[in-house]
Structures are given as structure tokens and as C-alpha cells.
Amino acid sequence: MFKNLYPDEYLDGIDSIDLEMYYNQGIRGIITDVDNTIVPHGAPADQHAIDWFKKVHDLGIDTCIISNNDEPRVQPFADKVGSKYIFNAHKPSTKNYNRAMELMGTDTKSTLFVGDQIFTDIWGANKTGVQSVMVKLIDKHEEIQIILKRIPEKFIMWRWRRKLEKESK
């Protein structure tokens, strides 16, 4: 029932992503969200973000930021980290996940998605057929509509963890 909402992996943050492992598995493009995935909501690209994108690019992995935010939020961030970008993405619609793969020259087998929200990020990636990594949100100060979505997210993640526990037995 919740299968389309489960991430393939759930990690503490972007630094916990084993980029070399994904590269060795054939990943050549990473689609990522910005707010509460890479930086706190509304924050500019900081040195940590710049360094992480450089590490990804140095491995030979392309990137594309897709965000539901407007261009004045996304474009300066993407420029600073050297990434392709799509703004006003209407996640979880699959349209811009597919467009991001076109921009990077990748397909569903060679693309990874990284985000912090189930109902936009992970659901969209899963509907598109892309591996998904969910990271813990960086900043708990969010807009009310996001806070309200976090409540059912907790239940879904609880179900996901139980499913993993059962599979490991």
C-alpha cells in the first residue's frame, strides 16, 4: 500500500551517501532537492554544499536540482554549486524528474534522487522509477503545509522500518 512512498535508503544527510558505491553501480546523475536536503530552508549555497557538489562532479556524476521553488531561489543556488536546475517543478509530478534526466543525459537506471520529503521528493522519484535516498531534514523550522505533511511521514517511515526489520529476519 505504501510502497510508492518508501525510499530505497534513509540516511542522516548528504554526507552519509556513499557516492563511490553509487558510481560503481552505474549512477551518472543525481537529481536533488535543495531546501532541508542540502541546506536549511531558504539558505544560500554554503561552502559545505559547494564542496559536496564538487565531490559529486569530481566522481563523474552530473547533477540537476529540481525544486518546487521559484527561479529566484533555485537559480543562484544552482549557479553557485555548478548544477543544472529546474524550478517550479511541481513534484511529485514525474515530468521534471524526466526532464532532469534529459538534461543530464541519464536514464532511470543511471540516476539517483536525493530529497527530504516523502510526499513530493520520494513519491515523485519512485513514480519515475529512479532510486531514491531520503535524508533527515536539516531544519525543523518549516512552513505550516510542510509541517502538516511531516505527521503522516512519521507513520510511513515507521511502516518502512518495520518492513525492513521483517525482511532482515
Image (spheres, rainbow, N blue to C red):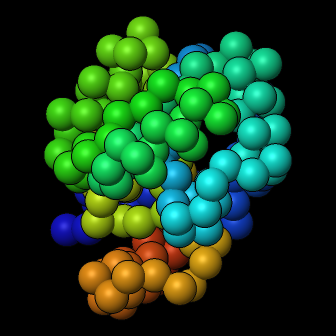
* 140 on left or right of 96: right
Screen quadrant of the C terminus: bottom right
| Location of residue 138 in the rendering, given as x and y in whole percent from the top left corner | 64, 72
x, y percent for residue 80: 65, 35
User: What residue lies at 30% left-to-right and 59% top-to-bottom?
Assistant: 120
Residue 142 located left or right of residue 4: right
The extreme top residue here reads 105
Q: Where residue 69 appears, x then y in whole percent?
A: 34, 54
Q: Residue at x 54, y 40 (%)?
A: 76
144 horizontally vs 139: left or right: left
Give the residue at x 44% y 72%.
160
User: Can residue 169 be spotted in the picture?
Assistant: no
Name above or below for residue 17 compared with residue 21.
below
Along the line of sight, which residue is nearer the eye, 81 or 37? 81
Residue 66 seen in the current view: yes
Q: In which quarter of the view is residue 74 placed?
A: top left
